[in-house]
Image (cartoon, helix red, strand yellow):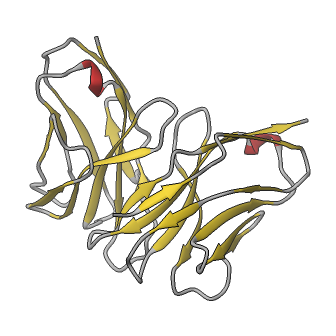
Amino acid sequence: AQKITQTQPGMFVQEKEAVTLDCTYDTSDQSYGLFWYKQPSSGEMIFLIYQGSYDEQNATEGRYSLNFQKARKSANLVISASQLGDSAMYFCAMTSGSARQLTFGSGTQLTVLP
Amino acid sequence: NAGVTQTPKFRILKIGQSMTLQCAQDMNHNYMYWYRQDPGMGLKLIYYSVGAGITDKGEVPNGYNVSRSTTEDFPLRLELAAPSQTSVYFCASRSQGGGEKLFFGSGTQLSVL
């Protein structure tokens, strides 16, 4: 069975600084996908970034980058130049199974301080 | 651009009542999913469907039923509501062969009292 572990229940970062949110995963599949979603207090799920297991380059989307270390089974999210609007819950997730359903971690609550 | 539409947004049920959460997508996606999110937790998969007429159980299916008679609609049925079903419910969809990204609805906040 697939498992996603996020060990940081809460994180604080100063505005304009970079922050890394940790994510480790466990799977026996060779083909899988790793995601990060943002959930602000309003509740919607916002897609941030995706990394395929066969992708050799780390994924980047604007201020977001995914530090993919396959041998260590980690997929950390790096947010550069944090903004107050980045304060939210962040979920790491992984696709699995023939229907590619997502398995989610428990999330990290990020607070950006002015 | 409707995307994934969930109704209702909020609902309060009494113990033992039944209801159907509606989910519709207008992107012609084959795959659809129902997740629940308990307070302070990640999302857990309830049921999923790979196409009209095909559904399967996820991690937490007990107390729920689904049907998929059309590509667009994937309703979630709660029978005999219990307080443990108090949660936020998300519907999501994705296309087959169109990449891994899931498109989420805005969620339904359900309270069972």
Left or right placement of residue B69 versus residue A13 in this view? left
Quadrant in which residue A12 is drawn? top right
Residue A75 coordinates in the image, percent (x, y)? 62, 67
Left or right placement of residue B45 versus residue B61 in this view? right
Which residue appears farthest toward the front when viewing the image? A72
Q: Nearer the viewer, residue A9 or B101?
A: A9
Residue at 57% from the left image edge and 74% from the top image edge: A51
Quadrant in which residue A3 is drawn? bottom left
Picture quarter with the N terminus of chain B: bottom left
Q: Is residue B72 above or below residue A49?
A: above
Q: Nearer the viewer, residue A8 or B16?
A: A8
Residue B103 coordinates in the image, percent (x, y)? 43, 57
Q: Is residue B102 above or below residue B7?
A: below
Residue A46 coordinates in the image, percent (x, y)? 56, 51
Picture quarter with the C terminus of chain B: top left
Residue B42 coordinates in the image, percent (x, y)? 47, 43
Q: Is residue B101 above or below residue B21?
A: below
